[in-house]
């Protein structure tokens, strides 16, 4: 059949779950490809709301194989708790509908402490989610990290690996604690962590996840041979990408489409569709440049109407106008084939809307994103808002102003819009 991918185009939290929900209907496998428990998506199952961080959102579909790919870093405790929570809610999580790649890297308690330590030491703080995601990727790059397959090693060997994995952390915190004691830092101390503690931690959570750890390659090969639909679920977003985003205010993986394909284990020539998900405005949680940010009453209104508070950390999100220059920039780098535009209902509540269609940069007008984004001033096009999407189920039924908003996005980016979100409930989706 095909392989499709869903990726975020802004700063995360664009509502990728909506597109996943629709595309997963015909999928046989849904693969989560990058990031870790820094991601957050809300799933409504049997009338209850669950904030999930690691499980692919397709887990609520018992007929789909949900998979955690090799590009993900998984916190054993969070993963194990999510599995238990979803099972309690009556969601099937068995070997035939859930798999974890044996290559997936493991986040351990010391990774979270390190995340906290780095943020404390940095003058220019990233504002990470504190989930130890970047520090797990760091140890992965240092080639000392544990993968899921390591959980099956003999006790001696696993302990040896943990000791190797812990070495740098314990050296660093000894120094950091010395500085703290010396009165240089006034933050909470960092614990020395023993091999025994992290071994026990691994054993405690291995129990709940071991049945799902497997070699995911043959499963993907078989699905491709059978012409089945594989759906790759991106996490975070383009502008948080460590190569293409707002470095250093980025996450530590590559949530652009190519990085997402790699994290899932499906080659670029096999990807038939890349659906980019965006909001009809912009939001960002964490620090970094934000050209169209609104630090005024309009920004507050968007935050309240759009419920812009982080799923993982609860932090209020920064809000601003839609920046089409940023969206267009992702078109070729991520090879977009269509768009999903969420929160068209939210932005329509404002009577006048601004959309950024260019930047003033070093005395010139430009329509691309330079590396020193902070030197850009937005050039806005003003559009008429004040629409309601209540009761609307088709594109044609949308008020003219709302349709014009969508046409502007299509014209500017050159990418057709496939899905439009007009309400929090996934049922409030218009298929164009
Ligand atoms: P980290 O990924 O926890 O290291 O955080 C790095 C930056 O990415 C911070 O600005 C986070 O707020 C942001 N970030 C990471 N994951 C997400 C996400 O799923 N949604 C929105 N922002 C995220």
Image (cartoon, rainbow, N blue to C red):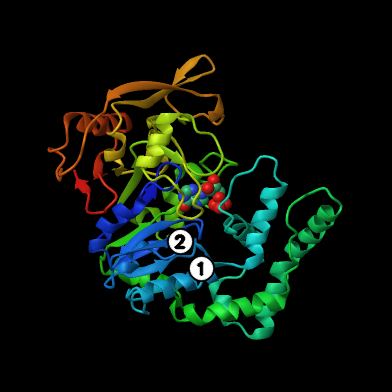
The answer to whether residue 80 is left or right of residue 399 is: right
The answer to whether residue 188 is left or right of residue 31 is: right
Are the residues tagged 2 and 1 within 8 Å (C-beta)? Answer: yes
Q: Residue at x 29, y 69 (%)?
A: 64
Q: Nearer the viewer, residue 225 or 148?
A: 148
Q: Residue at x 17, y 29 (%)?
A: 400
Q: Secondary structure at mark 2?
A: loop
Residue 19 image position (x, y, % from top left)? 29, 52
- The residue that label 1 is drawn on is 78
Asked if residue 313 can be seen in this view, the reply is: yes
Between the C-alphas of marks 2 and 1, the distance is 8 Å
Specify few, some or many for label 1: CA neighbours under 10 Å numbering under 14, 14-19, or 20 or more: some
- The residue that label 2 is drawn on is 53
Residue 105 image position (x, y, % from top left)? 55, 66
Which of the 4 image quarters holds residue 330?
Answer: top left
Residue 412 image position (x, y, % from top left)? 31, 29
Q: Residue at x 25, y 40 (%)?
A: 417
The answer to whether residue 35 is left or right of residue 163 is: left
Q: Is residue 159 above or below residue 305?
A: below
């Amino acid at each position: 059949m095909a392989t499709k991918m869903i990726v975020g185009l802004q700063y995360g939290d664009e509502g990728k779950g909506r597109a996943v929900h629709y595309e997963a209907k015909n999928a046989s496998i849904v693969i989560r490809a990058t990031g870790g428990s820094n991601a957050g998506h809300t799933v409504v199952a049997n009338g209850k709301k669950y904030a999930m961080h690691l499980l692919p959102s397709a887990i609520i579909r018992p007929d789909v194989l949900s998979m955690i790919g090799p590009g993900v870093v998984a916190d054993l405790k969070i993963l194990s708790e999510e599995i238990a929570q979803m099972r309690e809610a009556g969601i099937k999580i068995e070997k035939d509908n859930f798999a974890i790649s044996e290559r997936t890297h493991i986040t351990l308690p010391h990774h979270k402490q390190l995340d906290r330590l780095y943020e404390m030491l940095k003058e220019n703080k990233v504002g990470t989610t504190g989930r130890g995601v970047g520090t797990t990727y760091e140890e992965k790059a240092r080639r000392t990290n544990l993968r899921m397959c390591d959980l099956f090693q003999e006790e001696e060997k696993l302990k040896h690996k943990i000791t190797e994995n812990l070495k740098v952390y314990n050296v660093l915190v000894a120094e950091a604690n010395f500085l703290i004691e010396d009165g240089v830092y006034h933050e909470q101390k960092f614990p020395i962590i023993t091999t025994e503690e992290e071994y026990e931690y691994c054993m405690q959570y291995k129990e709940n996840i071991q049945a799902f750890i497997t070699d995911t390659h043959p499963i993907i090969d078989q699905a491709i041979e059978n012409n089945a639909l594989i759906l790759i679920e991106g996490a975070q977003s383009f502008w948080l990408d460590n190569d293409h985003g707002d470095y250093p205010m980025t996450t530590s993986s590559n949530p652009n489409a190519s990085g997402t394909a790699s994290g899932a284990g499906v080659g670029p020539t096999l990807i038939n569709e890349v659906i980019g998900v965006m909001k009809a405005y912009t939001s960002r949680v964490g620090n970094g440049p934000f050209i169209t940010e609104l630090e005024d009453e309009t920004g507050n209104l968007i935050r309240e109407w759009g419920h812009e508070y982080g799923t993982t950390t609860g932090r209020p999100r920064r809000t601003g106008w839609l920046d089409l220059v940023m969206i267009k920039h992702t078109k070729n780098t991520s090879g977009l084939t269509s768009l999903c535009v969420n929160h068209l209902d939210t932005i329509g509540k404002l009577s006048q809307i601004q959309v950024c269609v260019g930047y003033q940069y070093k005395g010139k007008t430009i329509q691309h994103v330079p590396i020193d984004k902070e030197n850009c001033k937005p050039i806005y096009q003003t559009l008429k808002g004040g629409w309601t999407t209540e009761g609307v189920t088709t594109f044609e039924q949308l008020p003219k102003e709302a349709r014009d908003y969508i046409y502007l996005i299509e014209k500017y980016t050159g990418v057709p819009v496939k899905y439009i979100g007009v309400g929090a409930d996934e049922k409030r989706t218009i298929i164009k």
